[in-house]
Image: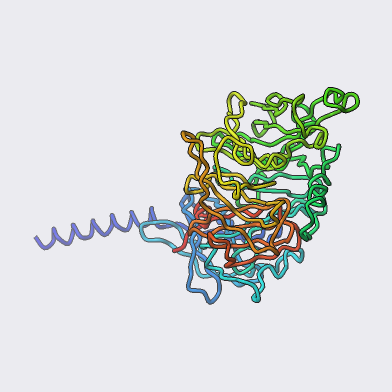
């Protein structure tokens, strides 16, 4: 009996040894590190095994107790893994781990990230100004530089640039996170915006409104290209608008979005020949308007809308005054039913446009379809969207009151009332006559951008500033990047 037991134990030991050999006899042939595009915040780890296995990388900053790990890869012999959101000029430790029942880890190794690119080194967050980094709820702020080199940067609550993407031949006007977790960027020829918005008299304000309203389509800070970038910094595709049907006439006016189907939706500059003598003018002239173009990422048109098809030009009292930019639609988004919301700055209104018929379904604001307290009228507003509470939200530039800030309204389309909800008006010195944005953060704070003062702020819902970032350029808008966006690339251990 004893001999049988010994034999069984020996057999089990042999089986265990064979299983261990077959499953755990794997070697890491090589580990190579590189910095793609020489970016200080991005490290690539190339791992080569002698057999197909799944791996991940564990890494941490020197003297930090916080450790991160990349997702487990598919089984293969060669693995290319990215470490993202690293701090510049910092020492990191890492291990390559083969994912088994009992993990096989390499020895602990280290690398040092390079210093930040000099054009990104800036005193983004000043200690003498509100700087409560926790008010950002663990996320970052995404900004775009429209000069050269054009770039998109993500800045954390301490004022450190943790991610950026650069393009040398063109500026970046605006960018947004897509439904598939990439970045969609509107590109435009570099134009110098000025940080200065001293409040002006009413007559001067009207002239200021009309200042950029000129015949040339690019005089409207129009975009000429679109690109999609993944979070590793790889440009997935780029469309130059002169290759789209309509060519140079398809200039982007302020905004690009991606819908749930992956199609690209842009605001465009649309024109109309019109006999101005019908309204007291002289001869045939070209009216400047706006439209919506839906296309795939090859530039093929899927659907198009032209505001002039929905507008009564002959009974428009302001057509002569604003002939070359009658509407100035400056932002585009989706209502909860997937129809379009557009900000119509000249009208001081938000319009809802049917995404299939092109009919204007309603107008919100001065002279709109909703009853609302006139003291809450907004003007030259930007960044229209539906916020997490289901309310319509805009950044009110408020040309006439000269106090800007994020506001929201609960819309009742049965009784046709608009009830104010958020009214987070910024201090007078943060007034911006143009551009700007306001969004609700996951913790209920607001991310607000006062473009022409170069200030990006986290405020409470009454407008009190909790944190402030200072730009050395004019940010068209500032968007929030939640920490959850990065789970495809790393998680905390």
| 6, 47: nearer the viewer | 47
| 274, 254: nearer the viewer | 274
Q: Please tell me in which quadrant of the rendered image residue 298 appears.
A: top right
Instruction: Please give left or right for residue 448 compared with residue 53 in the image.
Output: right
Q: Position of residue 199 (x, y in %)?
A: 76, 59
Q: Position of residue 197 (x, y in %)?
A: 77, 59
Residue shown at 77%/32% (left/top)?
A: 317
Quadrant assignment for the C terminus: bottom left
Residue 44 seen anywhere in this rendered image of the structure = no
Instruction: Please give left or right for residue 484 compared with residue 250 in the image.
Output: left
Residue 253 seen anywhere in this rendered image of the structure = yes
Instruction: Please give left or right for residue 459 compared with residue 212 in the image.
Output: left
Residue shown at 68%/31% (left/top)?
A: 293
User: Does 318 sit above or below residue 132?
Assistant: above
Q: Please tell me in which quadrant of the rendered image residue 47 appears.
A: bottom right
| 466, 244: nearer the viewer | 466
Quadrant assignment for the N terminus: bottom left
């Amino acid at each position: 009996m004893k001999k049988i037991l010994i034999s069984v134990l020996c057999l089990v030991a042999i089986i265990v040894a064979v299983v261990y050999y077959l499953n755990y006899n794997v070697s890491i042939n090589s580990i190579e590190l590189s910095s793609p595009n020489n970016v200080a915040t991005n490290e690539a780890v190339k791992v080569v095994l002698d057999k197909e296995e799944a791996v991940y990388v564990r890494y941490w900053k020197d003297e930090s107790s916080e450790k991160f790990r990349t997702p487990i890869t598919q089984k293969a012999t060669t693995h290319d893994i990215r470490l993202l959101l690293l701090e510049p000029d910092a020492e990191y430790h890492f291990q390559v781990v083969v994912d088994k029942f009992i993990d096989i880890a390499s020895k602990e190794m280290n690398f040092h990230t390079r210093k930040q690119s000099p054009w990104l080194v800036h005193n983004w967050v000043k200690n003498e100004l509100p700087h409560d980094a926790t008010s950002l709820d663990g996320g970052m702020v995404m900004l775009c530089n429209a000069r050269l080199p054009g770039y998109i940067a993500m800045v954390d609550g301490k004022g450190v640039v943790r991610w950026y993407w650069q393009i040398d031949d063109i500026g970046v006007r605006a960018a947004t996170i897509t439904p598939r977790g990439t970045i969609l960027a509107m590109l435009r020829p570099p134009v110098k915006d000025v940080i200065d918005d001293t409040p002006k008299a009413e007559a001067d304000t009207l002239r200021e409104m009309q200042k950029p309203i000129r015949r040339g389509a690019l005089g409207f800070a129009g975009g000429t290209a679109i690109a999609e970038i993944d979070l590793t910094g790889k440009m997935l595709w780029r469309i130059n608008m002169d290759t789209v049907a309509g060519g140079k006439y398809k200039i982007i006016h302020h905004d690009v979005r991606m819908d749930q189907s992956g199609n690209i939706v842009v605001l465009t500059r649309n024109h109309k020949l019109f006999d101005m003598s019908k309204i007291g003018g002289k001869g045939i002239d070209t009216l400047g308007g706006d439209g919506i173009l839906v296309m795939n990422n090859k530039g093929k048109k899927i659907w198009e809308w032209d505001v002039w098809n929905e507008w009564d030009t002959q009974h428009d009292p302001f057509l002569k005054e604003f002939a070359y930019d009658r509407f100035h639609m400056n932002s585009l988004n989706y209502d909860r039913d997937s129809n379009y919301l557009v900000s119509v700055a000249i009208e001081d209104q938000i319009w809802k446009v049917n995404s299939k018929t092109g009919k204007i379904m309603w107008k919100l604001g001065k002279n709109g379809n909703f009853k609302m307290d006139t003291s809450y009228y907004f003007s030259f507003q930007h960044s229209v969207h539906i916020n997490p509470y289901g309310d319509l939200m805009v950044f009110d530039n408020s040309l006439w009151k000269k106090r800007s800030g994020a506001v929201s309204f609960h819309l009742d389309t049965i009784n046709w009332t608009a009830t104010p909800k958020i009214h987070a008006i910024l201090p007078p010195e943060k007034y911006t006559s143009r551009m700007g944005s306001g969004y609700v953060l996951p913790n209920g704070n607001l991310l607000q951008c006062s473009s022409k003062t170069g200030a990006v702020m986290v405020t409470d819902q009454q407008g009190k500033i909790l944190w402030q970032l200072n730009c050395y350029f004019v940010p068209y808008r500032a968007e929030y990047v939640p920490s959850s966006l990065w789970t495809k690339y790393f998680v905390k251990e």
